Amino acid sequence: MGKDQLPGFDEKRRLLYSTEVRVEETNAAADRLLASEYYDDALDLYEKVQNLEKVRTVCQVAFAAGDVGLWMKCRRILKEPIGPEEWQKIGEIALMADKQRFALFAYQRAGDEAKVEQLRQTLLSKPPPEGDSRTG
């Protein structure tokens, strides 16, 4: 794999599951993935080598984007609890980014029942996407 080339499936698998941990190589591959906005893949590699500084970077990106799933994964790796205020804030960010299901989950965790009910009603009133098998 070249220095500027993204790792493919086999390369990522080798880096993640090899018993021999190659910290420098794994960090370099993760950095390339991060630069190309493959955040989840980069996070997996950073976790493997316990590069917590880079995990925090991914965490900040996820929070700013309202990506609740990725943000939760980062916080689990960092072993940081998430308080209601943080859930509320990422819910607001997710909602502004039109990630309503992420926002719903975050508001549930925050305990904001009013926002949860409001979002449920919004989601129920939306028709399923075109081509969805539930449209009959």
Image (cartoon, rainbow, N blue to C red):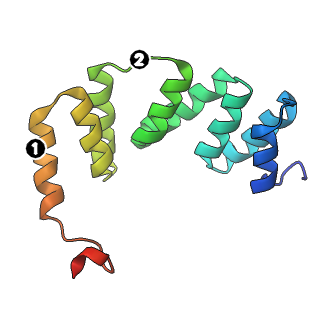
Q: Residue 102 at what x, y percent from top left?
A: 33, 45
Residue 127 makes an appearance in the image: yes
> Eyeballing the image, is 72 above or below 97?
above
> Eyeballing the image, is 77 above or below 42?
above
* Residue, disc 1: 117
Answer with the quarter of the image where residue 50 lies: top right
Q: Where's the C terminus, which quadrant?
A: bottom left
C-alpha span from label 1 to label 2: 25 Å
> Does residue 14 appear left or right of residue 43 in this picture?
right
Badge 1 or badge 2: first in the primary sequence:
2
Residue type highlighted by circle 2 = Pro
Q: Residue at x 51, y 37 (%)?
A: 61
Q: Can you name the residue that lies furthest to the right here?
A: 2
How crowded pointer 1 is (Cα within 10 Å; few <14, some 14-19, many 20+) is rated as some
Answer with the quarter of the image where residue 84 lies: top left
Residue type highlighted by circle 1 = Glu
Q: Residue 31 at what x, y percent from top left?
A: 74, 39
Q: Nearer the viewer, residue 30 or 20?
A: 20
* Residue, disc 2: 81
Q: Nearer the viewer, residue 61 or 87?
A: 87
Q: Residue 103 at what x, y percent from top left?
A: 28, 43
> Eyeballing the image, is 70 above or below 11?
above
> Does residue 73 appear left or right of residue 124 in this picture?
right
